Image (cartoon, rainbow, N blue to C red):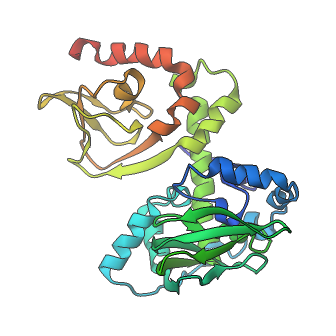
Amino acid sequence: MNPQKVKNGPNFMQQVNKKKHVDCALSSNSESSDDEVDEIIAIKKDVQKQRFSVSAEAYGQFNKKENFKAKFIPKTKEQSERIKQRMQAGFMFSALNNKEIEIVVGAMEEKIFHKAEYVIKQGEEGNVLYVVDTGELDCFKNYGKGDIFLKTYYPGESFGELALLFQSPRAASIIVKSDKAILWQLDRETFNLIVKEASIKKRQQFETFLENWDLLKEIKDPYDKLKMSDALFEKQYKKGDVILQQGQKSNEIFILEQGKVSVNKNNQKLFELIKFGEYFGDQSIVSGTVESFTYVAEDEIKLMYIPKKSYSSTLKEIEGTLMKNIQTKYGKYL
């Protein structure tokens, strides 16, 4: 799967826009506040204008990656592993490969804030984003009639990235709610040249795949396919890793991108999945039962996946085909 050449990255920006339209609204794993934030943002239409005032820095060839040398801040092994764990919760880090993850982790700088202290202030220039390690922080936005509370940030969530993508000041204020908060700070240059670029490329790869995936051939509207790219993520497994256990319920529908996966039942190997685009984990999500098979990585593999929570907005419209395919693929083994 070869990514198409990125002209100006609009699809990535569309993804960002769909998430939230203010600094404190690009939460990585909080869903309960989505409607609240969007409702508040809808009050002020001028916020939408901010989305389109995209700087040349966001799209252009600002400081070409091949000439870029990220800063490196020494950390303990425990700190590095904790940062990686926090990054796993964020959609914007999901496109990074292992080398890029190491670069980003190395460039992050620990920052400690205390209760009632401002981390960012609405209207100020923004040159860094933050990933929450410990503590809780509240987000407020002033629409001209005083501060309005938008949400609380928890460990694993991130904020401040929109100021790095758009030539605009901070759109909201973030204040420490707990007694202390430990954050990991990432600079603008590393974000733009590593995180943003990887996200754009990955989005292009996902779109190319979805446009040609046989499973979606009955979906005629190209937009219905492309919108699924917002729900696609990636995981990597090592040889021998159990991806999904017989008797469990799956939280993802997995799609084979690279490598081989063995399908086993009662500790007996039945067959292998080896073709790009083959998928599994759908049985429990589609039919509501537990998985009848165990899936094991036969070598180092790369999988795309659609989270269970995104099923209704992506693959549910072809549920009939999915049910039929379950019988075709596994019927004689059930």
Q: Quadrant of the C terminus?
A: top left
Left or right, 169 with respect to 229, comes to: right
| Residue nearest the observer in this picture, 195 or 61 | 195
Q: Position of residue 311 (x, y in %)?
A: 50, 32
Q: Residue at x 20, y 47 (%)?
A: 240
Q: Residue at x 46, y 58 (%)?
A: 89
Q: Is residue 3 visible?
A: no
Task: From this view, report whether residue 54 is shown above or below residue 312.
Answer: below
Instruction: Determine the residue located farthest toward the left in the rendered image.
Output: 267
Q: Position of residue 170 (x, y in %)?
A: 74, 73
Q: Is residue 96 visible?
A: yes
Q: Residue at x 69, y 76 (%)?
A: 63
Q: Position of residue 322 (x, y in %)?
A: 45, 19
State the image quarter where residue 190 is shown. Answer: bottom right
Left or right, 211 with respect to 167, comes to: left
| Residue nearest the observer in this picture, 300 or 119 | 119
Q: Position of residue 141 (x, y in %)?
A: 74, 67
Q: Residue at x 72, y 50 (%)?
A: 38
Task: From this view, report whether residue 237 is shown above or below residue 58.
Answer: above
Left or right, 200 with respect to 103, comes to: right
| Residue nearest the observer in this picture, 257 or 134 | 134
Task: From this view, report whether residue 246 is shown above or below residue 47.
Answer: above
| Residue nearest the observer in this picture, 102 or 135 | 135
